[in-house]
Image (cartoon, rainbow, N blue to C red):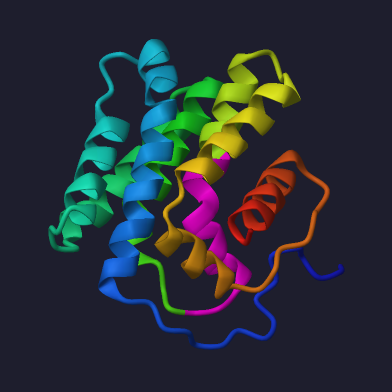
Amino acid sequence: MGAEPDSDAGTSAMTLSEEERRMVTLWAVACAGRALPLFEARAPSDTRPRDAIGAAREFGLGGKRTGQLRSLAWAAQAAAREVGDPVAAAAARAAACAAAAPYMHALANLHQAKHALGPAMYQAQAHELAAGDDPGVGDAEIRWAIEQASPAVREVVRRFPVRGAGRTRQSTFLHQLDAGLRR
């Protein structure tokens, strides 16, 4: 078996301040929030993704990283597994990733970069799936996410290794995000 596209070979430490985690989290919240209506349209009584996004927003605005925030991230991930709809699942995963963003480690590897980019990737996937697998919709969502990123988010992404293209649609999204945020 060959190396995976997000292999962590060559992992090194990097600096990552609490303020930078907050900025990445707020960007993640914006991305996940954009997909949330797609989840709620399919599972209106399930508040787990909304709760996860709300808790992540609270951290981004100065709150503490708590065990409850981590639990809400896991709950949104469970909602993704349980919903039985690919569009809603992708939207719930965006929420789970947003709530996990405050826990991103200060390691310069592609796995940690995926934590930062995951909310934007999943929200693009959710919109693309909702549009009948129209790649133009997913690409437009990636462009939107790139446009929303603050200079601080872009600086954090630049500290990670450059991501290659990969073979899956998710890998393509991650590559587009990585390249766009480095500009």
Please report the residue visible at 37 percent of the width from the left and 39 percent of the height from the top.
30
Q: Is residue 12 visible in the rendered structure shown here?
A: yes
Percent x, y for residue 80? Answer: 45, 33
Image: magenta residue range: 107-121
**Label tally:** 0
Please report the residue visible at 49 percent of the width from the left and 68 percent of the height from the top.
155
In the figure, is residue 178 to the left or right of 18? right
Percent x, y for residue 145? Answer: 52, 40
Quarter in which the C terminus is drawn: bottom right
Percent x, y for residue 77? Answer: 40, 42
- Based on the picture, tell me whether residue 145 belongs to the magenta stretch: no
Q: Nearer the viewer, residue 154 or 15?
A: 154
In the figure, is residue 150 to the left or right of 177? left
Residue 120 in the image: above or below residue 152 = above
Please report the residue visible at 38 percent of the width from the left and 57 percent of the height from the top.
24
Picture quadrant where residue 128 is located: top right
In the figure, is residue 111 to the left or right of 173? left
Quarter in which the N terminus is drawn: bottom right
- Based on the picture, tell me whether residue 117 belongs to the magenta stretch: yes
Residue 170 in the image: above or below residue 59 = above
Q: Is residue 86 visible in the rendered structure shown here?
A: no
Q: Main secondary structure of the magenta part?
A: helix
Please report the residue visible at 70 percent of the width from the left and 68 percent of the height from the top.
162
Farthest residue toward the right? 1
Q: Nearer the viewer, residue 173 or 44?
A: 173
Percent x, y for residue 151? Answer: 44, 60
